[in-house]
Image (spheres, rainbow, N blue to C red):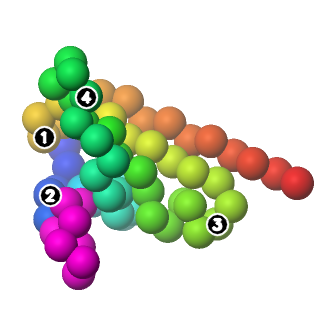
């Protein structure tokens, strides 16, 4: 699946994928980019996205329950 790139109100690079906005975390040595989801973090669990160019390579969800 493909993603839509943009910029946040604070000037950070963002990606929209499946109606969630991800903020750029880092560029990896292998040429991929790691992103973290803003919405998921505020709901007590984190989601991450890995892209190569304009396509999604991997999507991870981490759930933390108390």
Sequence-wise, the earlier of marks 1 and 4 is: 4
Sequence-wise, the earlier of marks 4 and 2 is: 2
Sequence-wise, the earlier of marks 3 and 4 is: 4
Sequence-wise, the earlier of marks 2 and 1 is: 2
Q: Is residue 63 above or below residue 59?
A: below
Expressed as whole percent of the image width and height from the top left, the position of residue 50 reads 32, 35
Report the residue marked by disc 2: 5
- In the rendered image, the quadrant that contains the N terminus is top left
Q: Secondary structure at mark 2?
A: strand
Q: Quadrant of residue 8?
A: bottom left
Q: Secondary structure at mark 4?
A: loop
Report the residue marked by disc 1: 54
For the residues labelled 4 and 2, the Cα–Cα distance comes to 18 Å
Q: Quadrant of residue 58?
A: top left
Q: Bounds of the magenta span?
A: 7-14
Q: Residues within 10 Å of mark 3 (few under 14, many from 20)?
A: few
Report the residue marked by disc 3: 43
Sequence-wise, the earlier of marks 2 and 3 is: 2
In the image, taking residue 30 as reference, residue 48 lies left or right, namely right
Circle on res. 32: none
For the residues labelled 2 and 1, the Cα–Cα distance comes to 8 Å
Closer to viewer: mark 1 or mark 4: 4
Q: Residue at x 18, y 73 (%)?
A: 11
């Amino acid at each position: 699946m493909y993603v839509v790139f943009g910029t946040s109100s604070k000037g950070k690079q963002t990606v929209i994928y499946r109606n969630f906005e991800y903020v750029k975390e880092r560029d990896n040595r292998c040429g991929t980019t790691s992103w973290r989801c803003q919405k998921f973090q505020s709901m007590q669990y984190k989601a991450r996205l890995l892209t190569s160019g304009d396509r999604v390579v991997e999507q991870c969800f981490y759930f933390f329950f108390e």
